[in-house]
Each structure stands twice: as C-alpha cells, then as structure tokens.
Image (cartoon, helix red, strand yellow):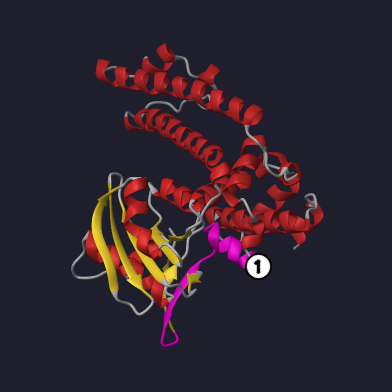
C-alpha cells in the first residue's frame, strides 16, 4: 500500500456522497480553517476552497461518486488524491462516526502522511472499463439463472439435464419446464430461461460494440495478451483496461497482490493468526485471470497435464488458483517485456 506523504500549504478532506459533501480544510500547522456540509456541485466546491487553493491537496475516499470531483480537480489544476476505501475503514474507524468527523480524519491523514492511496483511473478510459464491468455483471447474472434451473431440477430429484444449458439451442422452454408437475415451478423455469435469452442478446450486443468500437489504447499489448491460450478478444480488453499501466507495479508480487492472487498472512509475536485481506485488490481482474485459467484448460493440452499433476498434491480448486497465479505472472512479464506467450516457459517456470 502506498501512502501519500507530500507536504502542502493546506489539506482538504472530502466526505463525498451522491448529493452532498462535507469539506474539512487544515492548514500546514494542523489548524482547522474551514468545515461545512455542502451540496455536491462543482461551483460549491470551488467557492469553498478558493482562499486556500494555492498549495492545496484534496483527498477523497474511493466510492462510486468520485469521478466528477477528480475530473474537476484535474481541470482546475488542483492536486487530487484518491483514498483506498478498505484501508481507510481500518485506519479511521472510531466510536462515533459522522460526515464531519470523517472529513476531518481524511484531512488529518493527508497531513500526517498516512493517507492510503487508490489509483485514479484516467478519465479517457473509464467509460470503456465501466462497460466491460457491466458486461461481466450480466454474464454473472446469466450464470445464476442457469444455475437456478439446474438446482431446481435437483430439488425435485429429476434425471440430470443431458445438454449444457449455456448453449441456446439446448434450452427448449417447453421441454425444460415440462419436467416439473406444478404450474408455479414451470413458471419459475420459464422466467429463468426467458431472462437468460434476454441476457444473451444484451451480452452479444455489448461484445460486438466493444470489439468494434472500443479504442484500444495499447494495440501491441492487446495482441500480446491475445497470444495467451484462453484469452480471447473480450478477456484481453478486460485485462488491458483493468490493469491500464503495468508500470505501477514494480514487482510481479505487487501485481499478484493487486489481482487477489496471493495469501495475506496475519502474524503477531512470531505466531500466524490466519489470513485476511481477501477483498483488497481488483476483483474484476481476479475474475478475468480465473476465467482465463479455465479457458486455457479447454484448448491447451500441456496445461491439462500440468493440472492433473497438481491435483495429486492437493484439491482442484487449489490447482486452479495456482494456474491463475501463473497466468497473472505471465501477463505481468509479457506486458513489461513486450514479448509473446511462450508455452514452454509458462509451465516450467
């Protein structure tokens, strides 16, 4: 974790919400110069910080509404620091919590050099990244609907469904609903199948838009990612837009930690207290690398053989996690060195 520790003439903590924001401004000596609850509007923010604008740094917690504030600060040439939400929760937790106290603590953390930084994603690429994330959400919702059909079939102890429901041609509505005797169960299955068909259409539309219209800012790296078995055009876009700049990770371990592919041990007085921090990192990137590992097993025979050997040492889930971590390390070196995928080195390294 990187902490912001640069000295400034003034520090502004912003507890930001959808419609309101609480501002707290400290000077270099730590004295409160301004604190007030304001509407979340650019003009209100600029008017409030005007007396301390020269030498001011603004700190805001990473929540869903930070885009406009970061863009405003960039346009106005005001230094902006985005705070890591989970780390901030651990640092400034207290007995009493409200917007006024939160803004004051954000400003104090900025001044004290203990403000945990999150990555301020470039505005030019946010729209495509958000669309890719929306597509991933639809894919997961679709999977839940199909899983509900299978689970309902198991609830009534009916014969297994012979076809893979992921293919539209295998989802005959009358046939699948006809397995169940009760009208309400049939209606539930029909609803699942119709929603699945609707998701299929939307996912196809989004993928077509992304592959045709997405501005690939780094086409060379995009093609290098495509050279990895299991990474297709959409997964390559997800990796490209979720990582953005591989240079912000000095070592492979930093990248794997960001991708949630390492175990974070808790230790005290030389004794291990378990593991934690599983949600710190990029969940979208973790999903993409896990999906790439599963797809690699479909088309890369050496990877299948490697997985079989790993399963003898432990569970399949653990072996898949190791494979995803190897893929993450491969993506890191492939991007940093600008080289194509090497199947021989992948499984021997």
User: Can residue 143 be seen?
Assistant: yes
Residue denoted by label 1: 251
Image quadrant assignment for residue 174: top left
**For the residue labelled by badge 1, is the local secondary structure a helix, a strand or a loop?**
loop
Q: Is residue 266 magenta?
A: yes
Percent coordinates x, y for residue 61 in the rendering: 38, 58
Question: For the point 30% across and 49% down, which residue is it?
Answer: 17
Question: For the point 40% across and 22% down, which residue is it?
Answer: 195
292 relative to 2, above or below: above
Q: Which residues are magenta?
A: 250-270
User: Can residue 90 be seen?
Assistant: no
Percent coordinates x, y for residue 180 in the rendering: 33, 19
150 relative to 31, above or below: above
Q: Residue furthest left?
A: 96
Nearest to the observer: residue 221 or residue 193: 221
Percent coordinates x, y for residue 183 in the rendering: 26, 15
Question: For the point 71% across and 49% down, which residue is it?
Answer: 303
237 relative to 175, above or below: below
Q: Residues within 10 Å of mark 1 (few under 14, many from 20)?
A: few
Percent coordinates x, y for residue 282 in the rendering: 50, 54
Q: Is residue 281 magenta?
A: no
């Amino acid at each position: 974790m990187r902490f912001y520790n640069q000295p400034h003439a003034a520090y502004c903590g912003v507890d930001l919400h959808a419609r309101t924001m609480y501002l707290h401004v400290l000077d270099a000596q730590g004295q409160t110069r301004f604190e007030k609850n304001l509407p979340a509007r650019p003009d209100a923010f600029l008017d409030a910080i005007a007396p301390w604008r020269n030498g001011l740094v603004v700190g805001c917690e990473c929540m869903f509404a930070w885009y406009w504030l970061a863009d405003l600060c960039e346009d106005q040439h005001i230094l902006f620091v985005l705070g890591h939400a989970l780390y901030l929760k651990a640092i400034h937790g207290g007995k009493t919590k409200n917007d006024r106290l939160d803004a004051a603590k954000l400003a104090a953390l900025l001044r004290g050099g203990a403000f945990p930084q999150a990555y301020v994603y470039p505005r030019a690429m946010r729209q495509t990244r958000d669309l890719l994330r929306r597509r991933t959400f639809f894919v997961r919702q679709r999977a839940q609907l199909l899983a509900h059909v299978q689970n309902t079939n198991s609830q009534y102890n009916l014969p297994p469904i012979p076809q893979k429901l992921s293919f539209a041609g295998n989802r005959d509505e009358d046939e699948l609903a006809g397995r169940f005797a009760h009208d309400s169960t049939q209606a539930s299955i029909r609803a699942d199948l119709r929603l699945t068909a609707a998701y299929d259409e939307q996912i196809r539309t989004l993928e077509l838009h992304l592959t045709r219209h997405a501005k690939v800012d780094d086409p060379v790296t995009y093609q290098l990612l495509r050279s990895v078995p299991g990474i297709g055009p959409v997964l390559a876009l997800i990796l490209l837009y979720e990582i953005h700049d591989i240079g912000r990770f000095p070592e492979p371990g930093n990248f794997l930690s960001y991708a949630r592919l390492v175990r974070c041990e808790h230790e005290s007085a030389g004794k291990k207290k378990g593991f934690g921090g599983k949600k710190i990192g990029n969940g979208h990137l973790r999903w993409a690398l896990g999906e790439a590992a599963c797809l690699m097993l479909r088309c890369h025979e050496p990877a299948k053989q490697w997985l079989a050997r790993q399963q003898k040492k432990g569970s399949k889930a653990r072996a898949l996690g190791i494979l995803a971590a190897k893929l993450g390390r491969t993506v890191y070196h492939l991007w940093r060195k600008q080289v194509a995928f090497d199947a021989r080195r992948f499984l021997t390294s």
